[in-house]
Amino acid sequence: MSDNRSAHCEKDVPQAGKLYLYMNSILSTKVSIHITEVGQTTQQNLEEALIERVSKKCMEEGYIRPKSIRIQTYSAGTVRADNIDFHVVYHCQVANPVEGQVLEATVKTITKAGIHSQCIDPDGNIPITIFIARDHHPHSQEFQNIKEGDQIFACVIGTRYELNDPYICVIAKLIPTKYSSKFQNRRIRIKGGEMDNDPQTV
C-alpha cells in the first residue's frame, strides 16, 4: 500500500467519528423459487431462498449480516420452466469498510509478519479480518507489546474480497492508545437486536 494511504490514516485518526461495523442498506436482486412454492407463503419462501444465497457471505456490496435480511417488496413472477423468477427488494445490514475507517478488533495471532485480528459482531459473526503489518510500525513499542486476545483499534488502508467469500480482508494500521479513547464511547448498538433508523449501526 502507498505511503499516501498511511498518511491519510494518521491524519484522520485524531478526528474521531461514529464507530460502526455494519450499515443498514436496501438492495435488490433476482430470486428464483420452484413453482410449487408460490402461494400464500411466497414471501417466506423467497426470503428463505434469499438468505441461503447471500447471508454470511460477501456480495458485490460487501458482507451481508446473518439474521438482518427482510424482504420489503417483490415483483410479479416470471415463469422459467419449473421455476418462477422474482425481482426482490430487501433490507439488510452490510459490512464494507472504506479507506480511513476505524475498526475495533480482537487480536487472533501475532507472527513475524504482523498482527492478525478479527472484527466480531455481537452475534459472534466475523465479517472482517484485519492484518496489521509489522513493517508499517518499525519503531513502535506499543506494537511490540500487543498480545493475543487484546482489543485494538485500527485504521483501514485497503480491503479485498471476492463474491461468496466468508469475510472481508483488510490491511490496516494500528491506532496508538493515545487516540483509542476517542473511539471507546462511539460504538453504535442495535437496540433490542433490531435495526434502528440510523443508517450506521454495529
Image (tube, rainbow, N blue to C red):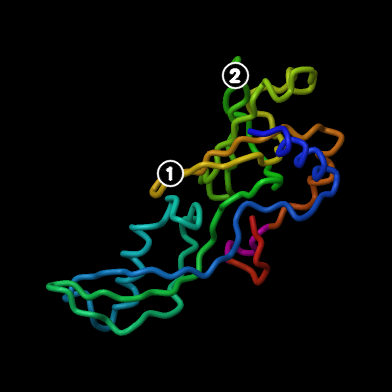
Is residue 191 found left or right of 180 in the rendered image? left
Q: Tell which of 125 and 75 is nearer to you.
A: 75
Is residue 201 found left or right of 184 in the rendered image? left
Instruction: Please give the name of the residue rendered at 54% of the width and 57% of the height, measured from the top-left corner.
Output: 94
| Residue at far left of view | 81
Considering only vertical position in the picture, is 164 above or below 91?
Answer: above
Q: Amino acid at mark 2?
A: Ala
Residue located beneath label 1 in the image: 166
Dividing the picture into quadrants, the one containing residue 156 is top right
Instruction: Please give the name of the residue rendered at 34% of the width and 58% of the height, measured from the top-left corner.
Output: 53
Residue located beneath label 2 in the image: 113
Percent from the top left, x then y, of residue 49? 31, 64
Name the front one of labels 1 and 2. 2
Q: Amino acid at mark 1?
A: Pro
Considering only vertical position in the picture, is 172 above or below 29?
Answer: above
Q: Secondary structure at mark 2?
A: loop
Instruction: Please give the name of the residue rendered at 66% of the width and 35% of the height, measured from the top-left corner.
Output: 172
Quarter of the picture holding the N terminus = top right
Q: Which residues are magenta?
A: 189-194
